[in-house]
Image (cartoon, helix red, strand yellow):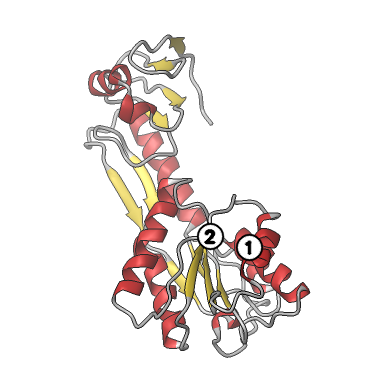
Amino acid sequence: MLAPPTRSTPDQDSHHSSVVTPLPPRKPAFGTAEPGVLRESATAQRQVAHHPNSAWMTARPGVSGCDSRSVENAPSTAAPTEQLNAHGRRRLFFVGDHYGSPGVQERFRGFTHALSSADASAAGAAIRVEFRERSGAEVAAQILGDAKGPDALDCANDELALSTMKALQRAGAKVPDDIANLGWDDIMAARYVSPGLTTVRQPHFELGRIAATGLHERILGAPTAPGPRILPTELVLRSSCGCPETDDRDVPWVTS
C-alpha cells in the first residue's frame, strides 16, 4: 500500500482509536479504517467531505464522496443457485458467515433471492462458519447423517467449498451425486480437484488494475467525481454441481 506521511489523531466521535488526517488538498492521503469507521465516525465523514483527494481502504460498503472498486456479489450467487435448481436440487444450504463481510452478505442475499423464485422445498438457514480451511470438517459433521440435510451447498468462497468437499468425500459422501457443491472466487485449485469445482470467477487482475489506475489519477489531481465502480463476475461450470465433467487444467488461468 502506498502511504505518504500522515498523522493519526484521536477520534472522539467513535470508539475507534484513530483516523488518518489527510494531507493538504491535491496530495491524496492514504489510510485504512477499521470496519464501520467511515460510516459511523462523524470525524471521518467530515475529513472525507473536506479532503476529496483522500483515499481510504476499508472492508465496508462504499461511502459517499469516496472512490470504491468492487465486484458484483448478489447476481453472481443467484446464477449458480439457479444452476443447482436446474439440476434438480431442492434442499440448498448456504455455507459461510453472511454477517462476516459486506460481500458475503450480498452473496447470501443473491442466494435467498434465487430460492424465493424457485421450487426449493427445504432451503436451510446458512451454516455459519469461519472462512477457514478447517471449517470444512465442521460443515460435513453438521450435515452428514441428517435426513433433512442439504442436497446442495452454496459456499461463500472456494476455500470453504474445497475443504467441505474433501471432508464429505473422506466420510464416504459422493460429490455431486449425494451433495452438490459450489464455491466463489475461482482460485487456481478449483480446476485441479475431482470433481472440478463449479464456482464464480471474479476479475482479480482487472479489479487491481482499475484500483491502481484510479489512485494514480487521484494523485495527479483528476477532476472526475469520486464514486463506485462494480465489475461483473462469471459463472464457471465444472462437475461439482452436476454438470458434465470437463477438463480445463491446461487452459490458462483467467485472472482478468
Residue 98 drawn at (x, y percent): 45, 52
- Find disc 2 in the rendering and name its residue: 127
Q: CA distance from mark 2 to mark 1?
A: 7 Å
Q: Amino acid at mark 2?
A: Ile
In the image, is residue 73 above or below residue 52?
A: below
Q: Residue at x 47, y 78 (%)?
A: 91
- Find disc 1 in the rendering and name its residue: 139
Residue 161 drawn at (x, y percent): 61, 65
Task: Please report whichever mark, 2 or 1, sits nearer to the chain's N-terminal start.
Answer: 2
Residue 189 drawn at (x, y percent): 68, 66
Residue 220 visible in the picture: no
The label shown at residue 225 is none
Lateral position of residue 246 relative to residue 218, left or right: right
10 Å crowding of disc 2: few (<14), some (14-19), many (20+):
some
> 84 and 173: which one is in front?
173
Q: Secondary structure at mark 2?
A: loop
In the image, is residue 139 above or below residue 147?
A: above
In the image, is residue 31 above or below residue 57?
A: above
Residue at the far right: name it: 170
Q: Amino acid at mark 1?
A: Val
Q: Residue at x 72, y 68 (%)?
A: 167
> 226 and 60: which one is in front?
60
> 184 and 230: which one is in front?
184
